[in-house]
Amino acid sequence: MSEIGTITKSALAAKLAAEGATMSEYAGVETAARFGDPSAEFAAITRDCGIYDLGWRGKIAVTGGDRFRWLNGMVTNNIKDLKPNHGNYNFLLNAQGRIQGDMYAYNRGDRILLDTEHSQVAHLMHTLDHFIIMDDVELADVSEQITSIGVQGPKAKDALKAVGIEPSCADPLVVCDVKWKGANVAVTRMASDDFLTYEIWLSPETAPALWDALKNAGAKPVGTEALEMFRVLAGVPKYGTDIRERELPQETEQKHALNFTKGCYIGQEIVERIRSQGNLHRAFTGFELATAIAVPAKVEDETGKEVGQVTSMATIPGPSGERVLALGYIRREARDRILKASGANLKPAAVPFKL
């Protein structure tokens, strides 16, 4: 990853641009937006095998003898009991229980590795560093040392095996270390029952050769426009877009980010109060729309009352034609009402959506 003026370029940016990709900023990093038709790229990651640059993900290393105890008191999930090379998803909250960022945390032995969007790295490091008082803890931005390549689709495992990487050691949110052509790489798999997605963590120097090998094995290059289509289909909220500082953890419906037995952490009192009292008025949901709209957009009922918001939207190609799908929030009592957003009819739907 390199800084060009005020633009951060991913480790693969120059290579992808040379291959004809349309480049754009995503999560604070310049990478490939598309290689051709985003609908065809979407088909690759849902029906075949696609590869994509994950250089827009950043990495923070947490070291020191107090790292497990300290981080366990910072975030919403159970850090202190993470097994070696296992990870989990977390929120960082303020004292009022509002979400300040999200991340995956992995126990990598001598350090805890935080994986988040590059655009969040500086803010998370500043916020976390504020709470290191007398603790034996150090934070380091190691995004320049580790980049990532995504390999996704029903044939992802075959593509990895074809280039000499055995992925079967990588269970969901479990990292395994392997060698590839003499280089150290790590393989992990995202937690999803519906889609097969691997991440390969490796040095920036090794990334171009692995990219070429995977392409030669039949994997199709994919840009962030298709990834956004998939993100909406899978119902995954994005921090800064679907998850803002106004949101409370339970409103996001990301139950896998919360642990209710781990003990105290910042914002825990609010999270526990919501759990015990059940006083949650709005919740994250999917929407099906009659037509595309500009987002964000207010959701209104038949009386014109605002009852929710559409935060993300994508037009998804499918066997029976295009569908307009969206993510956002709805008040619980309004789910069965007649709803509109920017004049378009819409209805709440469970996520992940089905193709």
Image (tube, grey):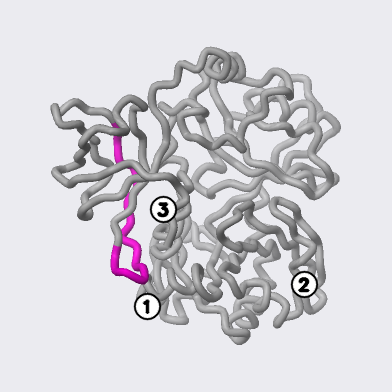
Residue under numbered circle 3: 232
The amino acid type of the residue labelled 1 equals: Gly
Where 171 falls versus 53 (above or below)? above
Please give left or right for residue 197 compared with residue 39 in the image: right
Q: How would you rate the neighbour count of disc 3 (Cα within 10 Å): few for under 14, some for 14-19, many for 20 or more?
A: many
> In the depicted view, which residue is nearer to us: 216 or 29?
216
Q: Mark 1 or mark 3: which comes first in sequence?
A: 1
Residue under numbered circle 1: 36
Where 157 falls versus 9 (above or below)? below
What residue range appears in magenta?
308-322
Residue under numbered circle 2: 166
Q: Mark 2 or mark 1: which comes first in sequence?
A: 1
- The residues tagged by marks 2 and 1 sit, at their Cα atoms, a distance apart of 30 Å
> In the depicted view, which residue is nearer to us: 100 or 142?
100
Give the structural element (helix, strand or loop) at label 1. Answer: loop
Q: Quadrant of the C terminus?
A: bottom left
Q: Position of residue 337 (x, y in %)?
A: 24, 32
Where 242 falls versus 206 (above or below)? above
The amino acid type of the residue labelled 2 equals: Glu
Dominant secondary structure of the magenta stretch? strand
